């Protein structure tokens, strides 16, 4: 019924409450009174038929229904923004004009070595695009979770072998990264060094491969990210097993040795929502990502040390 439809301002209120985890914080962010925010949330809960937030001394904590509602609210609000941006772009430059904000979530090595060239190509062809990039650790729900929750339009993600794209999202693999053995250049016995690792490094498939390698010891050093791993190896303190994207621009003090035909690989791809996949701006970024990934694949094929 029309009387039960939610208005955009009601969606903005529930998103603001979830962001601030308090009614007072949401009121301050929106320029409203706390009573106005409370009234709006109560009205939204009545229309939906579910309690969205647990109120208490600790603030406003979303219930399971609230988490789902807020994710949908973010995605609906983003579609409304896209509607306006694409309509303005079409009016200014034709049906395929690409303009407006574009929110991207990427894990560190993708943000450093895959995304910049894609965004440069996108901006060169479509100067009206306004990219916003967030670096997200690829742990738990990772970048795909940012997309599912409406915080990003597209995520560059590591995709598993058994379920390549999370349920409710769409996407595809951009590049298959081979792993390689990384050790200090010139070291007389690199396998005697401690093995260093980081939490985002491997999928379960790669871990299974890892467990079958008698020559690989248990990792005794762990760092925050692949940059720290490479720094330790470069300084002569450790060896590591790393994917190609993390080895882009590796210094001469590091030697990269192939792991043979049975080497593990890591699938890097993109994920987005079904509704945003049809928008001009997301489609344009995917084209650029595919072009950059294709160039990277050709470049790696010419480097025997990665094979």
Image (cartoon, rainbow, N blue to C red):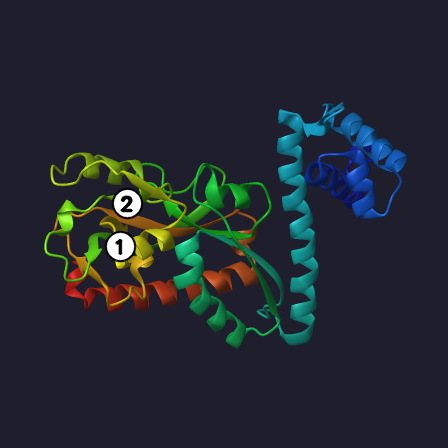
Question: Which is more toward the observer, 127 or 91?
Answer: 127
Density class for disc 2 (Cα within 10 Å; few <14, some 14-19, many ≥20) is many
Image position of 67 with respect to 117: above or below: above
Question: Which is more toward the observer, 298 or 250?
Answer: 250
In the picture, the quarter occupied by the N terminus is: top right
Q: Position of residue 111 (x, y in %)?
A: 45, 58
Query: Which residue does the image show at 65% across and 51% down from the upper left?
Result: 79
Question: Which is more toward the observer, 280 or 124?
Answer: 124
Image position of 74 with respect to 68: above or below: below
Query: Which residue does the image show at 88% across and 37% down from the upper left?
Result: 36
Spatial CA distance of label 2 from label 1 is 8 Å
Determine if residue 1 is in view.
Answer: no
Left or right relative to 250: residue 1: right
Question: Which is more toward the observer, 85 or 198?
Answer: 198
Left or right relative to 304: residue 126: right
Is the residue under label 1 in contact with that under label 2 (CB below 8 Å)? Answer: yes
| SS for callout 1 | helix
Q: Position of residue 307 (x, y in %)?
A: 16, 58
Query: Which residue does the image show at 19% across and 34% down from the upper left?
Result: 211
Image position of 80 with respect to 145: above or below: below
Q: Position of residue 37 (x, y in %)?
A: 84, 36
The quarter holding residue 75 reads top right
Label annotation for residue 196:
2
The quarter holding residue 83 reads bottom right
Determine if residue 241 is in view.
Answer: yes
Label annotation for residue 233:
1
Query: Which tag, 2 or 1, sits closer to the chain's start?
Result: 2
Q: Position of residue 243 (x, y in %)?
A: 28, 53
Query: Which residue does the image show at 38% across and 47% down from the upper left?
Result: 158
């Amino acid at each position: 019924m029309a009387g039960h439809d939610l208005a955009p301002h009601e969606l903005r209120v529930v998103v603001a409450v979830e962001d601030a985890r308090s009614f007072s914080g949401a009121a301050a962010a929106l320029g409203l009174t706390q009573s106005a925010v409370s009234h709006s949330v109560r009205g939204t809960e009545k229309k939906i038929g579910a309690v969205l937030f647990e109120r208490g001394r600790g603030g406003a904590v979303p219930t399971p229904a609230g988490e789902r509602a807020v994710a949908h609210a973010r995605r609906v609000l983003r579609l409304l923004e896209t509607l306006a941006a694409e309509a303005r772009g079409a009016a200014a430059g034709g049906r395929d004009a690409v303009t407006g904000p574009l929110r991207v979530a990427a894990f560190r090595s993708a943000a450093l070595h895959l995304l910049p060239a894609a965004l440069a190509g996108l901006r060169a062809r479509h100067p009206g695009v306004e990219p916003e990039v967030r670096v997200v650790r690829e742990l738990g729900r990772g970048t795909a979770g940012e997309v599912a929750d409406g915080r990003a339009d597209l995520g560059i993600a590591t995709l598993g072998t058994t379920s390549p794209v999370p349920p409710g999202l769409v996407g595809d693999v951009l590049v298959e990264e081979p792993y390689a053995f990384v050790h200090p250049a010139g070291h007389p016995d690199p396998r005697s060094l401690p093995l260093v690792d980081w939490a985002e490094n491997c999928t379960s498939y790669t871990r299974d491969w890892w467990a079958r390698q008698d020559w690989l010891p248990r990792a005794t050093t762990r760092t925050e990210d692949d940059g720290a791993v490479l720094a330790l190896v470069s300084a002569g303190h450790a060896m590591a097993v790393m994917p190609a994207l993390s080895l882009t621009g590796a210094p001469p003090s590091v030697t990269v040795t192939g792991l043979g035909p049975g080497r593990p690989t890591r699938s890097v791809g993109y994920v987005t929502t079904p509704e945003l996949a049809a928008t001009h701006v997301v489609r344009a970024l995917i084209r650029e990502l595919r072009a950059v990934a294709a160039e990277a694949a050709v470049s790696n094929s010419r480097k025997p040390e990665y094979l």
